[in-house]
Image (spheres, helix red, strand yellow):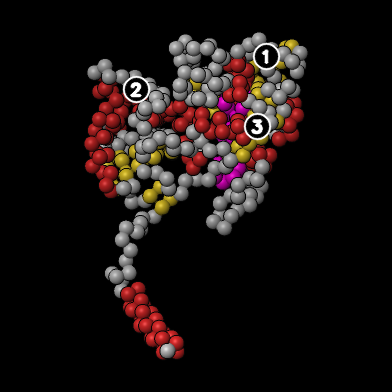
């Protein structure tokens, strides 16, 4: 009986195999429902690192986010005020980064910066002046203009450098970044930090060096393993320093009067959506958007009363979309020219009509279509056209000025 049963099973299996082959060979029967066939483009790989500088007592004195270009050489340095509000303006309690900093808790600092800037940090390091100097390339003395006097209350015991044009070695510049004046507001030292980093960035080669970069199987630059490796690669190509826009808080927003500034969320979103789109977080419930504002100077002349640059156009729209619960992942402001009419490409065909309805009010109308190529992590791409500038001019003429909302909403949305 066992042998007979086994024989029957073998016959049945053979029959099922034949049916399976016939089914798979039939293109209609073998076609899966809903399989995406459009080409997909990935966002560029741009490794980043958080670098914190401390004084001799282990207090936070300077902070930057460094990001490599996709080809693995050169990139950007974004300066972050150490008294920036870690809560990003939510709630009534202000919490400056420097107030909760613990030199032994790098992960805690990373978490605070990630939440504040809505980005993912891949690597981080906390160094003193000597540690920072060991990371940076050895350069000749540089001349830079200090916005304010540099005073180190504890480490240097007084005035280190006067405001104005000065010539500094790498050692002296790292000393400036590590200095803390207990009797002054943090804003002054932040301005000096920007000046120092801009001077250091000018020592980077342009174009990039010919030093070989290891590639993965797809031809992409392998990510650096350490912060030191990232800094080394950063100074193998052009380095751009970007300083985030800040806004002060009134007494109602800062009832305890703590020394704190609020990073303009619209501007920080613009900066990181340009330098590191693949690492931008999407905390809001709405769609993930890419904004293209490639207006030339001549095209902006038509709206000179409102906008001086494509960046300003993008910042305003970012604020509106954030306020409405959207997420901005990628932004382009190349200045290569805009189409006559705004073009919106949606990844999902079911969103076409809803997008058309929203575009009329928000953008002054647009040509809405289904994207032929999918962008990884992007639901909708908005390429602003001349019609958008005309729409904003009409709004201004009727007294409906462009929104300056910072993109923050309360807990109820």
Q: Secondary structure at mark 1?
A: loop
Residue that numbered label 2 is attached to: 403
Residues rendered magenta in the picture: 62-81
Nearest the viewer among 188 and 142 is 188
**With respect to residue 28, does 77 lie above or below?**
above
Marks 2/1: CA distance? 38 Å
Residue that numbered label 1 is attached to: 181
Q: Residue at position x 27%, y 27% from top?
A: 391
Q: Quadrant of the N terminus?
A: bottom left
Q: Secondary structure at mark 2?
A: loop
Nearest the viewer among 364 and 30 is 30
Nearest the viewer among 96 and 76 is 96
Q: For residue 389, which quarter of the picture?
A: top left
Report the side of 281 relative to 372 (left or right): right
Q: Mark 3: give few (<14), some (14-19) or many (20+) Cα within 10 Å.
A: few
Q: Position of residue 266 (x, y in %)?
A: 43, 27
Q: Secondary structure at mark 3?
A: loop
Discs 3/1, front: 3
């Amino acid at each position: 009986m066992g042998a007979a049963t086994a024989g029957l099973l073998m016959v049945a299996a053979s029959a099922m195999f034949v049916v399976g082959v016939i089914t798979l060979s039939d293109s209609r029967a073998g076609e899966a429902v809903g399989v995406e066939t459009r080409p997909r483009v990935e966002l560029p790989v741009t490794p980043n690192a958080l670098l914190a500088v401390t004084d001799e007592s282990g207090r936070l004195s300077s902070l930057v986010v460094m990001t490599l270009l996709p080809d693995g050489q050169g990139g950007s340095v974004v300066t972050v005020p150490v008294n920036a509000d870690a809560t990003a303006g939510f709630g009534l309690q202000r919490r400056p980064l420097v107030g909760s900093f613990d030199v032994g808790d790098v992960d805690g600092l990373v978490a605070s910066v990630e939440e504040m800037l809505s980005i993912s940090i891949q690597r981080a390091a906390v160094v003193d002046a000597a540690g920072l100097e060991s990371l940076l390339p050895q350069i000749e003395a540089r001349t830079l203009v200090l916005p304010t006097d540099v005073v180190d209350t504890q480490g240097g015991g007084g005035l280190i450098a006067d405001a104005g044009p000065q010539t500094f070695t790498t050692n002296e510049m790292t000393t400036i970044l590590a200095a803390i004046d207990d009797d002054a507001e943090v804003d002054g030292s932040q301005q000096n930090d920007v000046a120092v980093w801009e001077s250091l960035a000018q020592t980077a080669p342009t174009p990039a060096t010919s030093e070989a970069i290891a590639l993965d199987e797809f031809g992409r630059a392998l990510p650096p393993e350490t912060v030191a490796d990232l800094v080394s690669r950063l100074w193998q190509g052009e380095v751009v320093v970007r300083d985030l826009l800040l806004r002060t808080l009134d007494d109602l927003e800062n009832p305890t009067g703590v020394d704190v500034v609020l990073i303009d969320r619209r501007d920080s979103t613009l900066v990181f959506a340009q330098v590191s789109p693949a690492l931008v977080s999407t905390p809001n419930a709405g769609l993930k958007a890419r904004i293209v504002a490639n207006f030339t100077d001549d095209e902006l002349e038509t709206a000179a009363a409102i906008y001086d640059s494509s960046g300003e156009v993008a910042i305003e729209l970012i604020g509106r979309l954030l306020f409405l619960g959207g997420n901005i992942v990628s932004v382009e402001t190349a200045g290569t020219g805009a189409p006559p009419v705004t073009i919106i490409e949606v990844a999902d065909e079911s969103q076409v009509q809803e997008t058309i309805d929203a575009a009329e009010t928000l953008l002054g109308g647009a040509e809405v279509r289904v994207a032929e190529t999918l962008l990884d992590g992007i639901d909708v791409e908005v390429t602003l056209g001349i019609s958008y500038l005309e729409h904003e001019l009409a709004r201004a003429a009727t007294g409906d000025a462009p929104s300056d909302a910072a993109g923050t909403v309360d807990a109820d949305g």
